[in-house]
Amino acid sequence: MKDYKEKYGPWALITGASSGIGAEFAKQLAEKGLNLVLAARREDRLIELAKEIQQNHDIQVKTIQVDLLSDGFIDRIRETTDGLDIGLLVSNAGYRIYVGEYFDNPLKEELDMIDLNIKVPAILTHHFAKDMIARQKGGIIYNASVLGYMGTPYAASYAGSKAYGLVQGEGLWYELKPKGVDVLVLNPGLTNTEMTAPHDFSPLPMKLMMPGPVAKSAIEALGKRSRVTPGGMNKVSNWMSKFMMTRNMNTRMFGFFLKKVLKKSHA
Ligand SMILES: NC(=O)c1ccc[n+]([C@@H]2O[C@H](COP(=O)([O-])OP(=O)(O)OC[C@H]3O[C@@H](n4cnc5c(N)ncnc54)[C@H](OP(=O)(O)O)[C@@H]3O)[C@@H](O)[C@H]2O)c1
């Protein structure tokens, strides 16, 4: 525990900490003794979580109410983080998954998704990695998705935006390692959070995971490898996708299942 704090502390910044996997990151990093900066739009949720964590752990917690899609969001974050040693960046906030026909989704939604899932992590990384490199220690966790591995019909842009996180993260994992900074890409499969709640994913041949084990897998894998896929079923499915199927076969398979999800949602 001391090692983790020394390596990735004293402060961690978690985006999208107001619910789901991000809130779990907060609770579990508190257990590791890291001080926390929690960022999201819903301030009430952040304050509630901060109180809960501080009742159980002797750490400091700060909250930032911020819309990451607003201009100059990094300045708003810096009002709180300048002067703090952010040793761990958990770039977790993500745009809600859209499951549907591509042209039924308004262009604004598509562009906001690209901004939140691609531009925001890029800006955060640029800002916080510099100090980590100067200190020759730190960590960055990107929350991507198993869908980032393949073209995914009916969630094409979401999967594309997650592919960016996966590929950029892998590149930085290699580049920043000699500078003392560990990078990890977390690729969750379906997880039971507010993001998945609006859809009925029962036609898919896998069960939703709970967010706790998803966050835990990333916290444990940081510094040991470049990416992690949580859950036995997701690991098997990843292995099969990689070694037993072509890329087109994967895309067709996901197209088949997501069309069923789509039909069920509209039934
Ligand atoms: N659930 C899954 O099946 C699954 C699978 C693979 C990957 N993921 C990834 O996991 C990450 C966390 O998602 P989740 O499943 O935990 O869903 P979630 O509970 O809906 O969490 C999403 C988080 O992002 C924040 N957020 C969204 N838009 C924001 C904005 N404009 N500005 C600031 N914060 C914003 C939300 O906070 P506010 O609403 O308070 O702003 C919330 O804290 C996402 O990157 C998602 O793509 C999820």
Image (tube, helix red, strand yellow):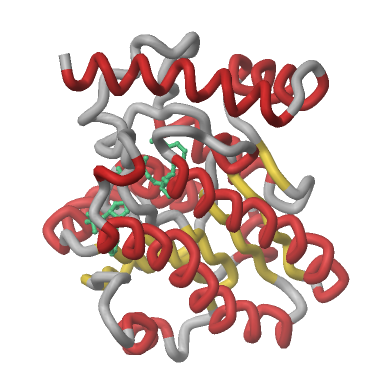
Whole-percent x and y of residue 250? 64, 24
* Residue 134, above or below 121: below
Q: Nearer the viewer, residue 224 or 108?
A: 108
Q: Quadrant of residue 259?
A: top left
Left or right: residue 118 versus residue 247 is: left
Whole-percent x and y of residue 120? 44, 70
Q: Residue at x 58, y 38 (%)?
A: 151
Left or right: residue 42 versus residue 211 is: left
Whole-percent x and y of residue 256? 48, 17
Which residue in the rendered view is the most extreme toward the front? 103
Label tally? 0
Q: Residue at x 34, y 27 (%)?
A: 192
Q: Nearer the viewer, residue 202 or 15?
A: 202
* Residue 130, above or below 151: below
Q: Nearer the viewer, residue 267 or 214?
A: 267
Left or right: residue 228 versus residue 153 is: right
Q: Nearer the viewer, residue 20 or 145?
A: 145
Q: Residue at x 44, y 23 (%)?
A: 209
Whole-percent x and y of residue 36? 41, 64
Which residue in the rendered view is the most extreme toward the left? 44
Task: Answer yes or no: is residue 59 visible.
Answer: no
